[in-house]
Amino acid sequence: MDLPLRLAMVLACATGTATTALAADRWEEAAGGAVAILPTPVEPKGISGGSLYCAEQKWGFLFRTDGEVGSPDALKIGVEGQSFTLPVEAKSRSLHVSVPTEMLNPLKAGVRMRVSVASEPPIIATFNLRDSKKVIEAITPRCSPIDMSAYQEVSLLEEGPSVDAATDLFGEEIKLFRQATKKQPSIAAAQFETDEGKKLLFGSLCGSTYYYGSSGCTLSGWRESGEGDWQQIYSSEGARIYIDKARMDGGWPGLVTVAMVNGVEPIHWSWRDDVYVAMDDGMMAEDETIEKPKSAQ
C-alpha cells in the first residue's frame, strides 16, 4: 500500500471519529490507528476541530474548517514559546500540515497551542494540550513503519562465519568499548553477494547508549578486496540497512538506511570513490553520526 493511500485511511479515521470529541476539553485517542483527537478549540475563527495523526513515521495535523479557505501558503503554530511556520495544504474544508518531530516534545509539555493562518478573514484557534503527552505516547507505537518493500533488508545475525569476520574487523573498536564501558559488546553480522560475485559484509556492535547514543549501536560495512581481506566502506550509528538493487554503480548496489531511533526518513547511499556516501538529507537519529570510512586492517 502506497503512502498516499495509507494517509487517506488514517485521515478518514481522524475525520470520522473527530465528532465524538466536540465537547471534550482534553486530548483523546481515536478508536483506531495512530490518531489523536484534539479538544474543542477556544474562541475559534474558521476552525472547528482537529486531529494529530501518524503514518509511516510521519506526523501531521488535520484541522477542520468552517468553509473553504482558498489556498493559503502557510500555517503558524505557537506552542511552549516556540513558533513553527509550516507549509499547508487546503482540501475540502480542511487544512493539512506536516509536523516536524521536534514539535512533538513542546506539544507534550505545553499548556496550549495557537493555530493561525494569514487569510481574509483570518483563521485562528487555540487548543489546550491537556493529556497531550499521554495520548501522543499512547498512539506513537501504532504508527505504521516506513514502507521499505522496494529494498532487500540485510538481516544481521549473532552467530555464523560473518560474525567471526566482523568480530575480527571490530577488534580495536571492541577494545575501546570495553575500556569505556567495562562491558562486553554484542556483535551481529551478515554478508551480501552481488550477481557479479562482489561481497559486502555488514556488522553491528551494540551494548551501550552511553557510548553509542540512543540506539546503543554502531554499524559498519566492508567490501571484500581480496580473499579474506576486507576494506571498510561504510560507518554510522543505530540504523537498519537495506540493499537497493535498482541503483548499481560500478557493480556495487545502493544502500538505504533507517535510523533505529527516531528514523523518520530513509537515507540513500551511493558508491563513490570506493566508499558509500549519503546522497540526501533524510532525517537521522538525533545523535547519529556519519564517519568517513577508513580501510580496515
Image (spheres, rainbow, N blue to C red):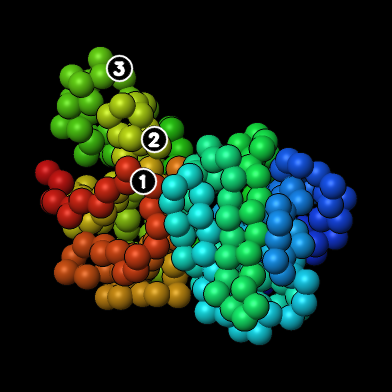
User: x%, y% of residue 41?
Assistant: 72, 54
Secondary structure under tag 1 reads: loop
Residue picked out by circle 3: 183
Q: Residues within 10 Å of mark 1 (few under 14, many from 20)?
A: few
- Pick whichever of labels 3 and 1 is earlier in the sequence: 3
Q: Nearer the viewer, residue 272 or 116?
A: 116
Coordinates of residue 136 in the picture (x, y in percent): 63, 42
- Give the number of the mark in front: 1 or 2: 1
Residue 252's place in the image compared with 120, above or below, is above
- In the picture of the structure, the residue carrying the numbered disc 2 is 214
Q: Residue at image x 65%, y 78%? A: 121
Label 1 sits on residue = 286
Q: CA distance from mark 1 to mark 2?
A: 8 Å
Q: Nearer the viewer, mark 3 or mark 2?
A: 2
* Marks 1 and 2 close (CB-CB < 8 Å): yes
Answer above or below: position of 79 versus 196: above
Q: Amino acid at mark 3?
A: Lys
Residue 159 in the image: state x and y as whole percent: 43, 32
